[in-house]
Image: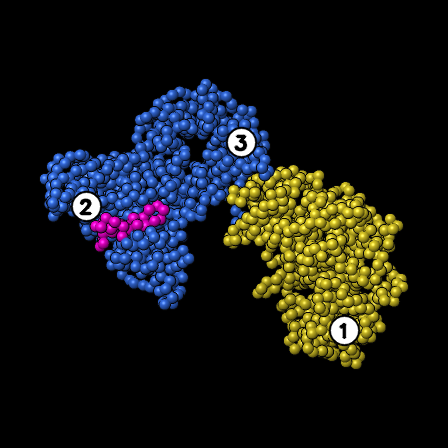
Amino acid sequence: MGEFEVHRVRFFGLVPAGVRCLACQPRGGRLALARTDGAVEVYNFAANYFQEKVIPGHETRSVEALCWAAGDRLFGAGLSGDITEYDLALLCAARSVDGCGGPIWSMAANSSGTLLAIGCEDGSVKLFQVVPGGIQFERNLDRRKGRILCLSWHPSDTHIAAGSIDFLRVFDVCSGQTVQRIMVNYHVLKVRRECIVWSIAFLSNGTIVTSDSFGRVQFWDWQRGTLMESHTVSTSAVLSLAVSEEEDSIVVGTSTGATYQFQLLPVKMGSLEKRWVRTKPFQHHTHDVRAVAHSSTALISGGLDAQLVIRPLMEKVQKKGYDAALRKFTFPHRRLVSCARKARLLLFQFSQHLELWRLGSTDETGKDGEVLPLCRMPEHLVQLKSKGPEHIYCSCVSPCGSWIAYSTASRFHLYRVQYEGDGVSIKKVPKVPKLLLPAYQLQFSSDSGSLFVASARGSVHVLQLLEPGGCKHLHTFRPPSGSSEAVYLLASSADGHWLAAVGGDWAIHIYDMKCFKVGAGAGGMTPTSLPPWGAGCQWVQRIGPLPVSHCCIPRAGLGMGLWEEMGGGHRWPRLLPSACCPPALQHHSTVPMYNCAVTALAIHPITNNLVIAYSDQQLFEFSIPEKQYTAWSRMVQNCGLHRVWLERDSPITHITFNPKNPSHILLHDTYMFCVLDKSLPLPDNSALLMNQSTLKQLPETARQRQLHAFKICKKFQPLLYADLLDENCLVMVERPIMDIKTQLPLPIQQKKFGT
Amino acid sequence: TFFCFHSDIYFFNICLEDCLSSLWKHILHVSDAVDASSEQIFLWSDTFQLVSVKLTKAAGQDLEAKELSVVLDGVDASPKCIAFGREGEYVASVKEVNLQVFFFKRKQLNRFSVSTVKTKSGNNQFACIACHPTEDCIATGHADGKIRLWRNFYHKKDYTFSTLHWHHDTVMDLAFSMEGTSLLSGGVESVLVLWHNESNCQKDFLPRLGSAIEYISMSSDGTLCCTLHTDNRITIINSNLRFSKSIQGLIKSRDVKTGLVVDPRTKALVLNGEPGHLQFYCLQSDQQLFSLDIVQRQYIHQAGLNQADLVKVAFSAQGKWLATVEEREEVTDPELQLKLWLYDEETQSFKLNTRINMPHEDHITDMCFREMDELEDDSLILVTAGRDCVFKVWVMVEDTDPEGSVSWSCDFVGSYHNYQATNCCFSEDGSLLAVSFEETVTVWDSITWDLKCTFCHPPGKIRNICFGRLTCSKYLIGATDYGFLCCWNLLSCALEWSAHLNVLVLQPDPLSEHIAAVSWLSKESSLFVFKPNEPRPIYIQRNLCKEKIQLAAFVPRDEPETIVSEKYHWLRRSQLFFLTDTQVRNSEVGLTTLLHTPAHVLPSASFLCPIFINSLLISKENKSAEEVADEVEMESEKTEDDSDEERGVTEMEQEDTSAMELLGEMTRKLSKSQEKELRKIRKMDYSWISAF
């Protein structure tokens, strides 16, 4: 694996916000999640539960309920009383409508996704119609006293069940009247205590399922108003409940952190009589499970301990693979840390502030596994507080450490940092260019001379940084075919020649920056001397050594068809790739589409190969100069990666390289750090993937035989960021779960046997 | 309609084995059978197969086995590990981490397994199984204390289970209520748990049941349930989880360390009872007279704990004094306590007189009192032999306080070449003390504490020693590890005779010259009764039983019997009882009492009849089904065989079967103790049945 001096950083005090609500897209492969800080995230089931989109939170926008309506439109409602629609392409709150009923506790969409019902603090249930471009108030249902904490539509859309304190109500949607009112009491020693119906579900056979603050899951016949079954699952409240689409399984979450599954099972073999039976208990959380969701193959729960747990239902999973893995996500699937390698600085991104730290240093050396004493302690240099209620989208520090940039939903900030001895002065760069905001990703070039800003509609802005503290907008790259999705990942080459950008459509575009700078294209054409161009227009020009007679552009951006004069009156048709086309000179190439989300990418500093990690754990290497996958990448695809590697449940979030060892690729996810040595053979499925500890015990000759390409280290967990500072020095940013737990309120006291 | 009665099964098996022997060679020993429907019976064999046999009723009482088919392979030997589902639709069996369910109609076998990974809460191997009476639900108990309720198990993939967890150790048995609404479970915690509606949160407890629950059974009408405990006790419990009645005979202790001792006062057999207690068990009435708490510490019902237990007991000749030794097994240093108890006439009980901490540095191996009638209390001394290579002599000293009470203190410490002291005993007149030190027997004068002489019969360490009595009081008998029985003459200090016999137990009759020796050779125990003055035994019984006999005791009769047969003359004044260790499934040492007594020396039929009649009456009152066969019962057949062999009377066999038919018809369900009583009766004498 090689020896590294490792800076084990544990001073990133990130406390992820708790999960407040979850919503599965009906008949869709996405899960929307809202956190207690108002952030909304979208996970894609097909892309291995990758966190596809993140809409950062907002101080005043709490989200109490989320729901999908009209296909893929996402709505949220919260205690501010507004219903907000989210724009999933631009990753921001699109528009808000006041519900006019005080704080909104619950929201539900009907099965066709045309109506939204909200439950308000004042006891009213209001219906909103989903129309193109927004929502419209339709009417109020029968209003009674008592806040409506939960809502559920009957699948036929004729009735709504609403849970409140001590009772639940059923509304007729047509008439708007309350047609049933059921008391959900709890009596203990003749004293009535307040019973909160935390969650409710209306099944198609007329059964209403409620979960309440006394740990009960109850099944009611709504027409008779009678209790059919009652299951006490916990001594504390059952906070959340979700039903599968087939209505044969229910998942509930309790305030002790346990989740339980209920299944509708036949009482006897072959008989039609079925009963709800509590089956599997799971204890993955330590705090309140405020939200649960039931996808077709998994039970999903989110808790105030900020964990999203995806527990696959083994019987629904076809083959053992990464679908069958239990996933626990605590940290975002993108980087919150950036590193100034030369200056040895780390920039940490919190929801509303940034922290700049200088790494400690040591002048001692030691053996493997030894902890070296620090001669200089890590130093907290700067804390940058973002003004306003908006949370930070992204941030970056330049490799030299003298520039810091971050963006919120409506503002972009660039700072110049100056180091005078031990002191640090920070100066805001005035008059930053007005860009299309927000920025989704920021990246400085390796010479710290320019800043790339990932923006909406697939565009990437290039800002030139000027001394002593200024910047100017140089250019904007756009994908030739256009895109509606925002760019979420950037990678620039060390020589400043190439820039790769990935948008929400998962297409990877590579832009040539030299070409754009010099303006010299192939065949002596310059962008300035271009004739007017467009679809269908023709012009004749000499390209390269061959005389060209005709040239036509079938469709803007795709490429160029032309006739080569072969002599003797013969002409030969030829299609030039788009990079050669005069109108899109900056766009170099597009990596062939792969049907999965890109989780990390990086350009090799020497070979200019683009290394791409996908959410299904596949790795590709694409040669930018040759515009094709490299031989090694093809070999990997032919042989296939190790089974254990493919079953890993957490996405690779960062890739970097070792300039001294060009065959090494350094990559990490939350639970491991891996040095991928391309010069070694790939492991086959019979070999042990994580073999570092066994290798250590082997004699040298045997070790040589057992070596394979994946050198995995699991010592640092959970790993938020890893980077190479210089050839033998690594920085690892860890955030121990225990440190987060100490920041959380105490969990509910439970008697544990033997303690 | 089936045989919950082990003896019936046994009887049945005889018939079956006859007809099966040609058909199915593998069924060598059919250990148990369970009913599913009236025409089919299921047997499981030593080869771990569950076999179904189709029966047709032929003329008369005979049954014919027609078809044989193997239903399940790899079945655990314990009947707790197999259960029949609702209406006999399926049969389920558990072994280790696997659950198999066989559906009879569909002829489908489904296998499920739990993960073999040992978690920190222990292993999750299956321990027992029960099936819901009306629904397709299987409850399984696990070694880590969890109960799993399986449903949907006719789908290989869509099966599901829920977990109930209260027990901290193995769930020993499970039983569903008759309607299936509640589930009973029990284990080493000695708490019966009633689970309502399969909910983890709704449960009731019946605690303090005395000892670990081994079996749970529900009556067919659902009004009663009964639990069988590891100490051989049955508790009958009302449906509302109220204790109703306890049926208790001899308490089965985990390990009978005290040996079999006879209380001179009550003639009761005294041995380990409940943990830390001494039980006084009356053989005649099969009742516990009383239980004396010796350790006087709370017993924690948890496996794997080292708790203080009673290891040695000795009575003075008149039963006035009782000495007990308790120890707590610690690897580094054992915790020992010697207690002396004085019988209090007022309370009719023993009262603690002296407590001596660490009387020896190491385990106490033997202990005996000397009491000479003529000298009364003054002559009373106690000798303890220890592994710390010394024997100690304890005497009573009068306290200085005005009440004149007495206490015990050490008077003399003797040792011999730094060998471990293993046995000690006094001669009948109390003048000599014999102490064995590994290979050597030393004889000491009990007044001056001089070493008189030594005997040795190499090779082999001395296992047992005893003095001859009455006319044979000049002899000292010793048994060695290498299979020699030696008789030394104390007057000539020479070996009188010796015999090559691997003696496990050497027991002198206190009322006669007879000494019983039980040997163990080629996997059978044999009994030899001899007088020390002649080397030829007066009575030999080979193949007494197939188990090792651990302990034996002569219990004096109230009145000497008149015995006609010369052969059994030695049983005139006392009866011999002995205890075997049984190879139980889970390799614990089981306790078995065998009443090995020829039929003609038993109490009269008039004494036994009421017991039998009572047992019939009780069985109608509480129909507590007891469908488990205990190891104890398995023993009974062997004794039966023995007695047949002994007498060689074929008529008795016939009487035997007729008696059993009678029982089989009249009492389908009998509780354990009733069964036991019946068993005893059956073993003893059947001639009285004709009178009945």
Q: Which residue is mark 3?
A: A219
Q: Is residue B344 left or right of residue A427?
A: right
Same chain? Circles 3 and 2: yes
Q: Secondary structure at mark 2?
A: strand
Give the letter of the chain under mark 3.
A
Look at label 3 and name its amino acid: Phe
Q: Estimate the spatial distance between the alpha carbons at disc 1 and disc 2, rounded to whole Å.
A: 108 Å
Q: Is residue A609 magenta?
A: yes
Q: Position of residue A746 (x, y in %)?
A: 44, 43
Rendered residue at 58%/64% (across/down)? B331
Look at label 1 and name its amino acid: Ile
Q: Position of residue A397 (x, y in %)?
A: 24, 46
Colour seen for chain B: yellow
Task: Specify the quadrant that holds the N terminus of chain A.
Answer: bottom left
Q: Position of residue B528 (x, y in %)?
A: 78, 69
Nearer to the camera, B489 or A451: A451
Q: Which residue is mark 2?
A: A512
Based on the displayed image, in which of its 4 quarters is residue B193 positioned?
Answer: top right
For marks 3 and 2, give the one nearer the viewer. Answer: 2
Same chain? Circles 3 and 1: no
Q: Which residue is mark 1?
A: B477
For marks 1 and 2, give the one nearer the viewer. Answer: 2
Q: Secondary structure at mark 3?
A: strand
Q: Position of residue A172 (x, y in %)?
A: 47, 21
Q: Is residue A747 left or right of residue B298?
A: left
Q: Estimate the spatial distance between the alpha carbons at disc 3 and disc 2, rounded to whole Å.
A: 63 Å
